[in-house]
Amino acid sequence: MPSPQRRDRKERVEASYSSRDGKFSMIYQGFIAHNQGVEFLLIFLTSAVIALLIQAYDPPLQWRYNDVPERTIVCRTPFLVVSGYEKIRDQERARMEAPHVFVNDLLPLVQLRESLWNTVAAMVRFRKYDRLDDQSRADFDQFLPRPKTDEKEPPVIDKSAVFDKFVAHFKDAATLDQFSEGLRKSFTPFEVHGLLDKLTYDARQGSQDHILVYRKGDPPDSAVSFRVNEVMIKNGQFRESFKKNLPRDMQNDDFVQLLSNWLGRKVEATLQEDDNATLIVQQKAADEVQDVYVEFTVGKPIISAGTLLGKSEMTMLQAEYDAFVEGRTDKERIHRFAAATVIIASLFGICWGFVRRRERRRPHTIPAFSTMLIGMILAVAFARLVQHHSLTSAEWEILPLLLFTITVSITYSWEIAIVFSFALILILSLGTGGGINLLIILSVVTISATLQLGRLHSRRKLIVVGFNAGVVAFLITLAVYVFAGHPIDDNLLRSAFINFIWAFASGFVLTGLLPFIEGPFNILSDMSLLVLADISHPLLQNLIRVAPATYNHSMQVGIIAETAAEAIGARGLFTRVGAYFHDIGKSIKPEYYSENQAGIENIHNTLGPQLSTLVVVAHVKDGVAMAKQHRLPKPLIDLIEQHHGTSLVSFFYGKAKAANKDNQNVEESTFRYPGPKPTTKEAAILMIADSCESACRSMGPDATPGKIENKVRLIIKQKLDDGQLDNCHLTLHELKIVENCVIKSIIAAMHGRVRYPEPEPKRD
């Protein structure tokens, strides 16, 4: 079966245009070209998700902590708000009125009761005053009334008569037992609530009417309330208790008064304040205070112009905002959400159109483009999360925004990072109520960080970039808020310092996250490429051992490809590292490749063209398998897989045609590499550098600069006509630059040297 006739590039272009019929077809073809339709759909879906994250269905709360409004803020809808001032006032009043807590140590009262009974029992045993010894007489004096301080001559007391009346109440042992039981009953109330000399706090520090008392050894929450008058030590308090609880014949005034006189000299306070328990009671009283609401009507001023928005002001504004949002209808929300989605999609679409038109280093595949959009969604989600938890005017969005911007800058270019980060800044500023202040601060910090990156050859540079961005964040925060009328106070300095911390932290966070970001999202930073470029890599070491000529070829191709890639703004380091690994598959059967056959017979002389082609083509598949086994990044595997595209193995194809004169059984497709064709500029440059270096190296000593130039131009033209460069986004202008760079590099690598004269033999 005859093979189809090959068409050159001009014929294919003309055929593609001739197949288009009508304006609708042209628009459709333009829409689906280079995945533009899929990209537009992804942009629209991303815009809808971001609009949902920023709650675009409702207007944002336009104020933040420590903002200073230039105009008076008036109420848009009736609402109730908790009056923080009045609640605080009521809580303070509750603390003032709360009773203090005291612990009652009843042991002193028990001991006092026992001492009184023992003293009375001792007096009774003497029966007569004359029989008392000196100590007993001194003890009995404690029962007598104290002389008044204003009396010049105290009245004379017949102690003997008083003593006789006192002991006359105790006729026998049974009477003493009755007296003991009466004392116990009389002391019981005082042992329950305790005794107190005086309150140690005034009316502004606690209740003057009631206290809480609990027994020593019991938990404080078992305290019982008592009136202060009940627990205060005062004259006559025991007299009333004695008259109720002593035996009837002992309830006369004279006897009770003698007992009261003795107690008045001995009794002491048994209550001691428990400060911790008092604080708990006071706090509980404050917590039980109900909220105090203030009603605002439409048009009523909420915040005066020039007021610094603190916590109470933001509470009022948030309450007014919540009431306003609650009054919105579902129809209004749907319309606003749809409008916001269209606006965001238009903004992203313009940014992406600009990038496609102007920037070479951009995501060219749908997975890469989707990864960048996912990064934008995560940045907005993180920014919204930290914003909801911020209690200062600090721009907490700095951290997620810098993480996204620096990652995109490392992966692609700083131009793409700035374009899309500015779009995110605009969305966050207008969509979340940040306003012009947030827009300026985030823009300056982001651009300052991005412009510092350049080539990232060490992780230490990320820390330096983060620190410099933090300094910029600190200064621009002060400048923006001072310009807006905010005083330079502790709040502003704290906010500026927080911005510095967030920006500085971005360098540390990204240093730790970058290895985890690179793998799942197929991102290759320069730092990772430098690690892979180390010749100690097992694959490269194996290539050196079994196929040293192929290794030297790979190194040379890497130099040529890197120079060409840098010339057109592609990733030179990525291309060079890809060149190092592009022929690792040849290490499986190195003797089947001409560069490794020095000194041995060409094995292909004993094989048929088809079999030789299968062996040669297999190095691509083997290389991909080895790369996956050693977990090389996906972008490098793509370079290995695409570095020959679907090129024709022309040597064996020509050999097969020569062996078959009628060409009836020579299928061109069986002599081609499996592909796919290069899909990136780096893969196309690697293909060109690989083919040109091999072809020019095979020319041997006859490789003059003119022949090298002709050979390179011929190979590139063949690749172009064969359609190998159709999917790589290389322009003809860029291809011309690549061509010139490859020519210069190969000529420089193969330049001749002056033959040095042989040393003359020494004469004897």
Image (cartoon, grey):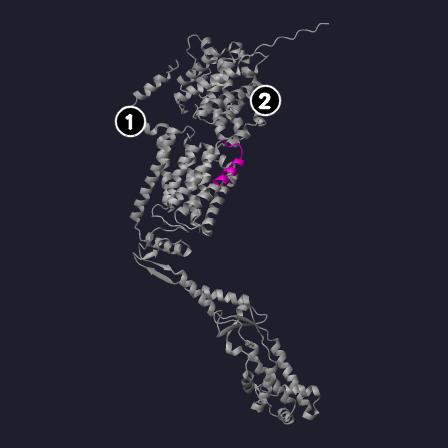
Q: Which mark is residue 25?
A: 1
Circle nearer the N terminus (1, 2): 1
Task: Name the side, left or right, on which 413 lies relative to 10.
Answer: right
Determine if the magenta segment contains residue 15.
no
> Extreme top residue here?
764
Residue visible at 29% across and 26% down? 26
Q: Which mark is residue 111?
A: none
User: What type is the residue that disc 2 sits on?
Assistant: Ile
Crowd band around label 2 with a 10 angstrom C-alpha radius: few (<14), some (14–19), many (20+): some
Q: Is residue 393 visible?
A: yes
- Quadrant of the image occupied by residue 110: bottom right
- Quadrant of the image occupied by residue 137: bottom right
Tag 2 residue: 544
Magenta span dominant secondary structure: helix
In this rendering, the label closer to the viewer, 1 or 2:
2
Task: Name the side, left or right, on which 212 lies relative to 57.
Answer: right
Give the Cα separation between the discs numbered 1 and 2: 54 Å
Label 1: which secondary element = helix
Label 2: which secondary element = helix
Task: Name the side, left or right, on which 663 lies relative to 618.
Answer: left
Magenta span: 455-469
Crowd band around label 1 with a 10 angstrom C-alpha radius: few (<14), some (14–19), many (20+): few
Q: Is residue 397 visible?
A: no
Q: Position of residue 606 (x, y in %)?
A: 54, 11
* Image quarter in which the C terminus is found: top right
